[in-house]
Image (spheres, grey):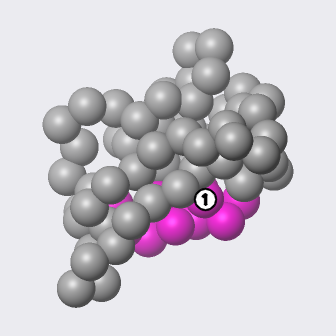
């Protein structure tokens, strides 16, 4: 499975800007005020890092979509 889309979902909770995602996957995420996904990232190259960041997010606002 490869990741094809990554986004910030604040429908249940709000990003706390803790920076954990950026420390786990700095090529994918940046946290100026709130987490944002960098543009033109090859998500497939960072599958494991994206999943680790999503799993580690204290408020579970990092979401991703996979395809085969």
Please indicate whether residue 59 sits to the left or right of residue 22 in the image: right
Question: Split into 4 quadrants, where in the image is the N terminus?
Answer: bottom left
Where residue 8 sits, quadrant-wise, is: top right
Please indicate whether residue 36 sits to the left or right of residue 17 in the image: left
Mark 1 is surrounded, within 10 Å at the Cα level, by few (under 14), some (14 to 19) or many (20 or more) other residues, namely many
34 to 53, vertically: above or below: above
Q: Which residues are the magenta region? A: 46-56
Q: Nearer the viewer, residue 15 or 45?
A: 15
Question: Split into 4 quadrants, where in the image is the C terminus?
Answer: bottom left
Q: Position of residue 45 (x, y in %)?
A: 24, 62
Give the residue displayed 67% in from the left and 65% down from the top.
Answer: 55
Q: Position of residue 49 (x, y in %)?
A: 47, 61
Q: Secondary structure at mark 1?
A: helix
Farthest residue in the top direction?
33
22 to 45, vertically: above or below: above
Where residue 21 sits, quadrant-wise, is: top right
Give the residue displayed 58% in from the left and 65% down from the top.
Answer: 52
Please indicate whether residue 33 sits to the left or right of residue 4 in the image: right
Q: Nearer the viewer, residue 65 or 50?
A: 65
According to the picture, the residue beneath numbered tag 1 turns out to be: 54
Q: Nearer the viewer, residue 16 or 24?
A: 16
Specify whether residue 52 is painted magenta: yes
Specify whether residue 50 is painted magenta: yes
Give the residue displayed 40% in from the left and 51% down from the top.
Answer: 6
Give the residue displayed 32% in from the left and 55% down from the top.
Answer: 5
Please indicate whether residue 61 sits to the left or right of residue 43 in the image: right
């Amino acid at each position: 499975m490869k990741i094809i889309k990554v986004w910030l979902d604040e429908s249940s909770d709000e990003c706390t800007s803790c920076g954990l995602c950026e420390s786990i996957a700095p090529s994918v995420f940046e946290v100026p005020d709130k987490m944002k996904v960098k543009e033109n990232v090859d998500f497939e190259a960072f599958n494991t890092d994206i999943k680790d960041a999503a799993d580690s997010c204290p408020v579970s606002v990092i979401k991703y979509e996979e395809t085969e």
